[in-house]
Amino acid sequence: MDYRRFGMPDFNAVPRSALLFAVLSGGMLALSFPKPELWPLAWIAFLPLLIAIGRKSPRQAGVLGFLTGMVANAGILYWLNIVMVSYGHLPVAVSVCLYLLLTAYLSLYPAAVAWGMRRGELLGISPLLTFPVLWTGLEYLRSFALTGFPWASLGYSQYRLLPLIQVADLTGVYGVSFLIAFANVLLYRLLRSFIGTHPCPRPVAGLLVLVLLLGGTLWYGASRLKVVPSGAPVKVALIQGDIPQDVKWDPAFQEATVSIYERLTRRAMQEKPDLVVWPESAAPFYFQDEYAYAQRVINLVKGTGSYLLFGSPAYEQVGDRVHYLNSAFLVGPDGSVLGRSDKMHLVPFGEYVPLSGMLPFVHKLVAGIGDFSPAQRLTPLETNRGKLGVLICYEGIFPELSRRYVLAGSQILVNISNDAWYKRSSAPYQDFSMTVFRAVENRVPLVRATNTGISAIIDSRGRMHGTTPLFEEAVLEGSIVPGSEQTFYTRHGDLFAGLCLALTAILALAGFVKRIDQDR
């Protein structure tokens, strides 16, 4: 069958053994992420793919890269079917088709990396340059192309390796991705030289570069971990209500939901916290006009000396239209409502339907409310212990948003979320792993309150000072020190990743010009 007639990779053009090696690479990549979180595999995951590519044509290399991407992304994102079938009420066949479509789109990026690396080799450019640069540059492109989906970038697989990830305050997560990609291609070249198939020039020099990069990164990380943040600690209490997703928006369950959060919050108040945090949409009613329920929420902290941050839907009247918002409200110790922060980066198909006029048969997952609108402004919430930057739901996976909050004066990042959608899959662990980097990048603590877990307290070095299990009621208490510095990353953003993307464009242009010269 000629797959190219349908715009698909032609797997028949590649030896079966090479396809198996590409599948192996994809499987190793998937296993390096939570769960099962076999993070050392990431450092060798590309070896089978690179061996499979060998001296093949750029087209064949692209096919192999695509296959690796399909296997890796399918293994990482399998939980999408749980969400679409259980809560989107899609037929299994439709869910699988949409899941494979997204997987195929994401697999175009590793396909382009493999194609570009092999094309570069034919032009005399070392894979030690092309592979890590292309991988990092295209991983960055994926973070904002088509609204952005930076889920499971390569560096996130190392979130528990604290000395390694401290470099994120310079390069963001992309510096870790670059280092892993560089190590993979260097180990491949050393292996190729060792077995004598295609000797590589100056293997010792390449190994020395890796030792210097890795050693320098670990030395920097160790030195940053020794720094003790200064400032008065803030006592926090995170409330995990464990409200089942299938009743969360049921009006008949509102009373039970409020009662659960009242009970858990009163328990937390025994330790006199400075800040109490409830998850996203913990109050499943309009706090703005549901007076009876709103007053009960306010009375929990009134006169206690504590602030309460909680998620609740909101709305704004703009002309003749009503805009619905996914929001967080802050109530002060005197019972006054001090402010509201609205979600800026909405979940496609979760909170709104893109191209809804063309897709009338597709419905969003959040029931009971019309399509949400994105916030028009970023709003830190101010307490007497510092400003809070509120990341709602999967806003925690977008590093530029956390950075903007810190630039606006936020000294504590608060991620409120509801991971009940994912049930007992790998998704809550993957989601959590990414938020660790937000704290390290900006050197501010991050507290994470979720409906069903994982709630966590993370300090400015990425250390976890308590986490909660999935699907259990919980009160998590601890202390954090507000951030007091602006890192290189905070000031300059994804400069490193942007340079890699610029180099990717230059390499693509050089290859295009070279091709024209060869065709003359």
Image (cartoon, rainbow, N blue to C red):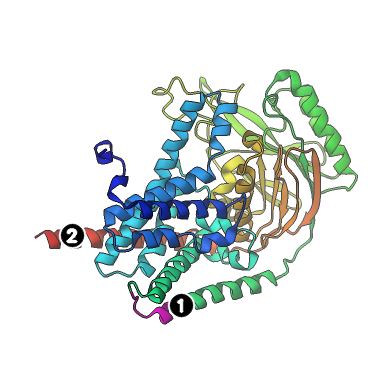
**Viewer-nearest residue: 441 or 508:** 508
Name the secondary structure under disc 2: helix
- Residue on which the image places disc 1: 207
Q: CA distance from mark 1 to mark 2?
A: 32 Å
Residue 339 among those drawn in magenta: no
Q: Residue at x 46, y 77 (%)?
A: 207
The location of residue 32, given as percent across then percent down, is: 56, 55
Main SS of the magenta part reads helix
Task: Look at the numbered disc 1 and give the secondary structure of its residue.
Answer: helix
The three-letter amino acid code for the residue at tag 1 is Leu
For the point 65% across and 74% down, the residue is 223
| Of the image marks 1 and 2, the number of the one nearer the N terminus | 1
Q: Say which quadrant the C terminus sits in.
A: bottom left
Q: Residue at x 39, y 71 (%)?
A: 192
Mark 1 crowd level (few <14, some 14–19, many ≥20, 10 Å Cα):
some
What range of the chain is rendered magenta? 199-208
Q: Give the residue drawn at x 19%, y 63%.
A: 514
| Marking on residue 515 | 2
Q: Residues within 10 Å of mark 2 (few under 14, many from 20)?
A: few
Q: Nearer the viewer, mark 1 or mark 2?
A: 1
Which kind of residue does numbered mark 2 sit on? Arg
Query: Can see residue 122?
Result: yes
Q: Is residue 344 above or below residue 313?
A: below
Q: Quadrant of residue 290?
A: top right
Relative image position of residue 295 (x, y in whole percent) = 80, 28
Residue 153, visible in the rendered structure? no
Place of residue 482 in the rendered image (x, y in percent of width and height, measured from the top left)? 71, 58
Nearest the viewer among 43 and 253 is 43
Q: Which mark is drawn over residue 117? A: none
Quarter of the picture holding the N terminus? top left
Q: Is residue 208 shown above or below 191?
A: below
